[in-house]
């Protein structure tokens, strides 16, 4: 029965949901979702994003915002790493 429910797009049972952890998920593994198979692969037609790490569901706008914040965080961390590396020489 679970196979049929998954096939029909029903949500997972609560017991199968990812468990919350003490640290917040950074949502770095956001996967786009589309409403129509014809739209798959078209960035302008993404309807929502799902985090593969924690299962959180984001609207298109929120998903794009989270992705942009992560890009800034990674860039900032890289700049800090390069500064520390240059100071260490």
Image (tube, grey):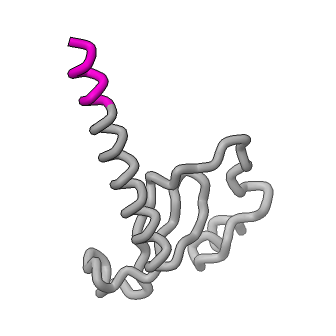
Extreme residue toward the front, this view: 87
State whether residue 64 is above or below residue 69.
Answer: below
Residue range (magenta): 81-89
The stretch drawn in magenta includes residue 86:
yes
Residue at figure coordinates x 46%, y 64% from the top left: 66
Count how many numbered circles sit on residues in the image. 0
Q: On screen, 3 above or below 38?
A: above
| Quarter occupied by the N terminus | bottom right
Residue 58: % across, % down: 54, 72
Name the residue at 37% across, 80% down. Answer: 46
* Residue 36, position as x, y percentages in the image: 39, 87
Quadrant for the C terminus, please. top left
Q: Main secondary structure of the magenta part?
A: helix
Q: Is residue 19 left or right of residue 25?
A: right
Looking at the picture, does residue 11 appear above or below residue 18? below
The residue located at (33%, 85%) in the rendering is: 45
Residue closest to the far top: 89
Give the residue drawn at x 36%, y 39%.
Answer: 77
The image shows residue 74, relative to residue 34, as above or below, that is: above
Q: From the viewer's perspective, is 37 left or right of 88?
A: right
Front in this rendered view, residue 42 or 2: 42
Residue 31 place in picture, x, y as percent: 42, 63
Question: Residue 33: image x %, image y %?
Answer: 43, 74
| Quarter-of-image position of residue 88 | top left
Between 38 and 7, the one nearer to me in the picture: 38
| Displayed quadrant of residue 32 | bottom left
- The front one of 80 and 37 is 80
Residue 26: say if magenta: no
């Amino acid at each position: 029965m679970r196979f049929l429910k998954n096939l029909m797009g029903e949500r997972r049972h609560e017991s199968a949901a990812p468990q919350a952890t003490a640290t917040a998920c950074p949502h770095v593994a956001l996967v786009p979702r589309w409403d129509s198979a014809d739209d798959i692969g078209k960035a302008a037609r993404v309807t929502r994003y799902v985090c593969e790490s924690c299962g959180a569901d984001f609207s298109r706008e929120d998903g794009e915002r989270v992705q942009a914040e992560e890009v800034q965080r990674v860039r900032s961390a890289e700049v800090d790493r390069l500064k520390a590396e240059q100071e260490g020489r």
